[in-house]
Amino acid sequence: MSAPLKAAAGGAAPVPALRRPRRLVPGDRVGVVAPSGPVPRERLELGLDILRGWDLEPVVAPHVLDAHPSGYLAGADRDRAADLQAAWCDPSLAAVICARGGYGTQRMVDLLDWAAMAEAAPKVFVGYSDITVLHEAFATRLGVATLHGPMAAAETFLKDQPTQDHLRRTLFAPGETRVLTSPTARTLVPGRAGGVTLGGCLSLLATDLGTAHARPSADGGVLILEDVGEDPYRLDRYLTQLLRSSWLGAVSAVVLGSWERCGPAEEVRSLMLDRLGPLGVPVVEEFGFGHCPSTLTVPLGVPAVLDAEACTLTLEVPALS
């Protein structure tokens, strides 16, 4: 017999489900934007070819291939913001797909006209890593569910067929991807709990605290976490900041993805158990999303149940309507 769902600590009310955009159909036009780092032209072209192979019509925003004196931004902040806003508000586009992550969304997110974007119909939004800042803002400012998934010019998307297939099925047939799991997944803390999915890149969630678009807490949510290139002591710092701010105080469950170039796996595992174990909620590790060679698409803003023993995350509704 399955264990009952674990209630959020402190009797916190469940996080309401966000508005789900419609699924894609062949022939849809999809915008491609670069809110963060610079995009190599050759990788972008390869990604666009994959999207065209899915019978989609990619529309590249004007500033996607811009350069910036910093070397680490895809053009000027206002131009990156203008591209994203225009794509989101364009009624002819069914989705907005980020070209890559890197760094830069924190510099442009406050330049968006959120009132204008709120008037637009919700559409699919895809990205991860630095795009975590936008996932949070889309949830809190627009009330729209989004997809933590591979980006159009990311090497994983270009090279890994399972990564492509899972994103494609999530976009076109979301009913087929309601149960998420990974052959590498392991139980870190047993249990079963439900809530609305949220999260993304750990360092971005920590540095987002206190901003206008950050949610006040993860209360009642199923939190997904991953990161790349952060030493264990840095991961400790981010987790401790989330704990000290009480942001994690009433989270329902935690799903851990990849920790590429974050130190020895056993050291990271020990850290996660030390920092997250005392929360008393189910935790699964190595769930196969984030900065890894093959990555799952994980919907954010969708009610789901984590079964830590079975290592499954089951969406109560499809990612898209």
Image (cartoon, grey):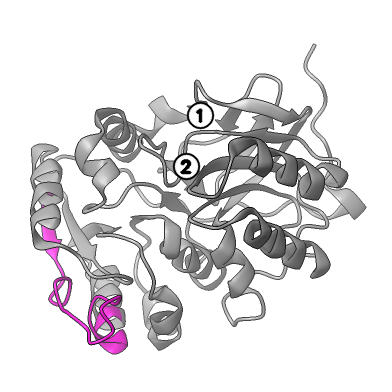
> Which region is colored magenta?
57-80
Disc number for residue 298: 2
- Residue 74, position in %: x, y? 24, 75
SS of the residue at dot 1?
A: strand
Disc 2 marks a residue whose amino acid type is Val
Give the main secondary structure, helix, strand or loop, of the magenta stretch.
loop
Q: Give yes or no for residue 261 being in the magenta stretch.
A: no
Q: Tell which circle, 1 or 2, labels the residue nearer the N-terminal end.
A: 1
| Residue in view at x 14 percent, y 56 percent | 44
Q: Is residue 303 found left or right of 159 in the rendered image?
A: right
- Residue 270, position in %: x, y? 74, 40
Asked which quadrant contains residue 99, the reply is bottom left
Q: Is residue 27 found left or right of 182 in the rendered image?
A: left
Residue 243's place in the image compared with 71, above or below, is: above
Total residue callouts: 2
Q: Give yes or no for residue 77 being in the magenta stretch.
A: yes
Q: Quadrant of the C terminus?
A: top left
The answer to whether the residues at label 1 and label 2 have Cβ atoms under 8 Å apart is yes
- In the rendered image, the residue lying farthest to the right is 10
How far apart are the two marked residues, 1 and 2, measured between alpha carbons? 8 Å
| Residue in view at x 69 percent, y 26 percent | 187
| Residue in view at x 15 percent, y 62 percent | 40
- In the rendered image, the residue lying farthest to the top is 1
Mark 1: few/some/many CA within 10 Å (<14, 14-19, 20+): some
- Residue 26, position in %: x, y? 15, 40
Asked which quadrant contains residue 219, the reply is bottom right
Disc number for residue 180: 1
Q: Quadrant of the N terminus?
A: top right
Disc 1 marks a residue whose amino acid type is Leu
- Residue 311, position in %: x, y? 62, 24
Mark 2: few/some/many CA within 10 Å (<14, 14-19, 20+): many
- Residue 24 visible here: no
